[in-house]
Image (cartoon, rainbow, N blue to C red):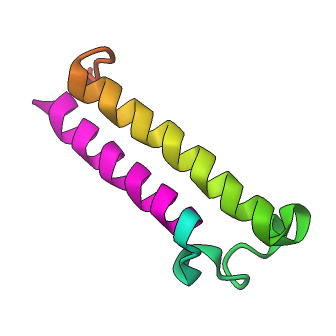
Amino acid sequence: MQSLVTGIIFTVIGIVGVAGGVLGWQILLNPAHNYSFIRSLGPTGIRAFYIVIGLFIFGVGIALLLGVLQFTSR
């Protein structure tokens, strides 16, 4: 049950990250929040960064949902 909920959360966060990078959402790309990243990577680089991180988080979420990864608390 815990892996299912965690998988859904990771999948949704991954989709938001990819969509924010592709669509250029200002809430993610606001220079006031990410000034050091934007300055070092540039506007296009920071969008690519969000897309790659979003795809990774989405992949982890799918792996959790399919049971490839297990999330257990001890």
Magenta span: chief secondary structure: helix
Question: Which stretch did the figure color magenta?
Answer: 1-21
From the top left corner, tell me how far across and down residue 45 is, in percent: 79, 59
Left or right of residue 36: residue 32: left
Q: Splitting the image into 4 quarters, where does residue 60 fall?
A: top left
Left or right of residue 37: residue 69: left
From the top left corner, tell me how far across and down residue 69 is, in percent: 33, 18
For this rendering, which residue is in front, 2 or 37?
37
For this rendering, which residue is in front, 2 or 12?
12
Q: Splitting the image into 4 quarters, where does residue 67 fall?
A: top left
Point out the residue furthest to the front here. Answer: 22
2 versus 74 height, above or below? below
From the top left corner, tell me how far across and down residue 55 is, in percent: 51, 42
Check residue 14 for magenta coloring.
yes
The residue under the point 34% across, 35% down is 61
The residue under the point 59% across, 52% down is 51
Check residue 4 for magenta coloring.
yes
Q: Which image quarter is the C terminus in?
A: top left
The residue under the point 58% across, 46% down is 53
49 versus 62 height, above or below? below
Q: Splitting the image into 4 quarters, where does residue 73 fall?
A: top left
